[in-house]
Amino acid sequence: DIGIPSDYGQTWLLTSLIGPGLAKQYMYTGTRITSHEALKLGIFNKVMEETGSDNEKLMEEAMALAEMVAGKPRQTLVKLKDNLNAVMSGCSFTDALDMEGETMQEHLRSEEGGREHEEMKAKFRARARAK
């Protein structure tokens, strides 16, 4: 509520994250979005309680997430990132389906992708047998 239209890509970001209806509501009214509301709306992935000046818990959680992602098959992550970037660039649902099919086939035919797939299948089967 400072008498200027949005800036810094706010209209695009908010609309793409929460849809045009809610984006209009929040932007027209100037209503602030709390961290917990932002979590419910999907703007944030996680909200942590403030711990003062000690960021140890924040760093622990950030490193755990980074390690989890780093432990995933590299080529699979590359292909996922490509697909997600294409969707965020506005490709249609039909184009996304076609792209995923092409990406999957390309990935499984590649040496690294095929190896990653076999390794992950073996891990999946071992977890299933352990249950």
Image (cartoon, grey):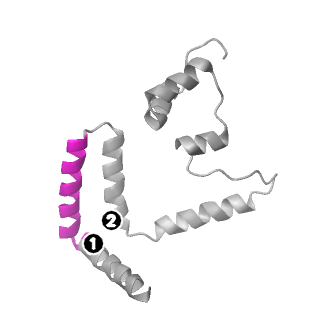
User: In this image, 1 relative to 98: left or right?
Assistant: right
Q: Can you identify the residue that label 2 sits on?
A: 75
Residues packed near mark 1 inside 10 Å, few (<14), some (14 to 19) or many (20 plus): some
x%, y% of residue 80? 34, 56
Q: Residue at x 44, y 27 (%)?
A: 20
Give the magenta range: 93-113
Q: Amino acid at mark 2?
A: Gln
Q: Magenta: predominant secondary structure element? A: helix
* Left or right: 50 as drawn, with respect to 20: right
Observer-nearest residue: 131 or 1? 131
Q: Quadrant of the N terminus?
A: top right
Q: Position of residue 99 (x, y in %)?
A: 21, 50
Q: Residues within 10 Å of mark 2 (few under 14, many from 20)?
A: some
Assess whether residue 26 is covered by the magenta stretch.
Answer: no
Residue at position x 34%, y 59% from top?
Answer: 78
Q: Is residue 66 above or below residue 5?
A: below
Residue 43, visible in the rendered structure:
no
